[in-house]
Amino acid sequence: MSDDPIRVVLAKLGFDGHDRGIKVVARILRDAGMEVIYLGLRQSYANVVNAVEQEDADAVGLSMHNASHLTLAPKMVEALAAADLDVPVIVGGIIPDEDVQPLADKGVAAILGPGASAEEVAAAVRSAVAQRAG
Amino acid sequence: MSIRDLPIPDLFERAVEGDRRALGRLLTHIERENEHAAPIAELAHPLAGTGHVVGITGAPGSGKSTLTGQLVKLLGELGLRAAVLAVDPSSPLTGGAILGDRVRMEDVASPETFIRSMATRGHQGGLALAVPGVVRVLNACGYNPVLIETVGVGQVEVDVAGTADTTVVVATPGMGDGVQANKAGLLELADLFVVNKADRPGANDVRRDLDLMLDLSHATGQDQRTGLRPEIIMTSALTGEGAPEMWEAIERHRAAITANGQLEQRRRDRDVVEVRNRLLVAAERRVDELLSAESHADLLDRVAARSVAPATASSEIAQQLH
Ligand SMILES: Nc1nc2c(ncn2[C@@H]2O[C@H](COP(=O)(O)OP(=O)(O)O)[C@@H](O)[C@H]2O)c(=O)[nH]1
Ligand SMILES: [Mg+2]
């Protein structure tokens, strides 16, 4: 059954405004053969949890472009765990180097900087999903 | 225990009791047509079949998702538990898809609404198998009505209209939609027309065009199957204006086809069509198996070498078709 497409819920949390980055990621994942459940901007944790449940998603992708990633991303991980949903959270955006380890420690499965290539983005999602499933 | 490891009957029981995660998982099995799909259908079938299934179709951008969100909101206020199945095309090149309907629906509908996005994939037997399967499980879990959103292109609509009790075709001003709908064969599928974006100029022209087209396409303006003339409703999905009228028209359609026996007939036909579609898929699989069998390689080579005609080869192979 491994040729079933990976389903990714893609969202931007909180009030951070533009959607250029997240749209680019959506197309990258689609072109890598994945099904992207696109939630867009200004999402709450509850919205993302709802979508993961109803869509039976394999992963959550968060696009972050402000300084709040250090609190928002770990809270998303917690909200999913609280709902008993075992799906990896992958964060993309402008994340300073010194924040990478703290995010990983709090359960973020992968972190992608703005310089990541399409192949790297897709590979990070694939391997995060494979690790959970295995 | 992780929900992924639960036995199917337990998963099903949980879903019926309202566990949305369990329901989400069941729908994945159905969509994948994997080994769990048939046992799930067996459990769901006796509980399903009475819910109202509404298809909502039309061009991309016509406002189907926004309108569906408004409808779901309204239905919630009426005390009904609606679910949405939103179908979008997969990329034929990569098999991937961007499923963006939740964005517009969540603008209006409550976060508790059950919304499932589905890509057309390379489903064997098309969506003709997956869609009724998903609707059956949603129905069995107490969702009624089930609203199915699809983009108005070709076979997908035909498959979905086959699953719906009431098919709504959404048109908008400024796109020559009446003509488009006619070309795409959507006119024949429509039980009801909605002219959305009625806040925009030209909405009344669309209404008039549709009216005219109905006059031309049926001598009496009435649908041959139902004896009904499709109503035309004006909506503005951004504000929700017209959504109550739309729902009332959907209910009138249902009442009419219930009264004249069409609903029962449609449902019976639909079940037979589903059995037929499944048989066709199974037959196709068997044919492919036979064709790739080592024992027929020689025969197929002779067809290629023009010493055996295709018709002769196929009747020879057909003898093993059982
Ligand atoms: N002016 C106007 N815009 C609308 C209306 N309904 C939807 N829209 C807009 O049309 C665009 C497409 O809507 P969407 O629901 O995604 O259409 P879909 O592709 O048919 O599902 C969005 O920007 C909506 O906000 C309406 O009644 N009036
Ligand atoms: Mg839509």
Image: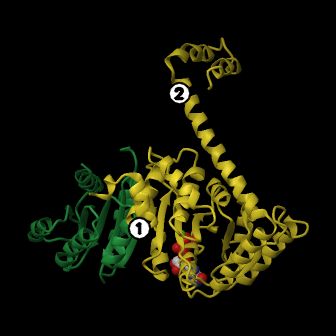
Chain colours: A green, B yellow
Q: Is residue B240 above or below residue A4?
A: below
Question: Picture coordinates of residue B135 (x, y %)?
Answer: 56, 61
Q: B238 or B288: which is nearer to us?
A: B288
Please, which chain is the residue tagged with disc 2 on? B
Image quarter for ligand 1 = bottom right
Q: Secondary structure at mark 2?
A: helix
For the question of whether residue B294 can be seen, the reply is: yes
**Image location of residue B1, percent across then percent down:** 26, 57
Image x and y of residue B292, in percent: 51, 24
Neighbours of disc 2 within 10 Å: few (<14), some (14-19), many (20+): few
The residue to which callout 1 is attached is B20
Label 1 crowd (10 A; few <14 / some 14-19 / many >=20): many
Q: Amino acid at mark 2?
A: Glu
Whether residue B56 appears in this view of the structure is no
Query: Circle 1 sits in a helix, a strand or a loop, which is it?
Result: helix
Question: Which residue shows up at 51% across the image and 54% down it?
Answer: B43
Residue lying furthest top:
B307
Between disc 2 and disc 1, the foreground one is 1
Viewed as shown, does residue B52 lie left or right of A117? right
* Marks 2 and 1, the one that precedes in the sequence: 1
The amino acid beneath tag 1 is Arg
Q: Going 24% across and 68% down the picture, which residue do you hit?
A: A81
Question: Residue lying furthest right in this view?
Answer: B219
Q: What residue does disc 2 label?
A: B289
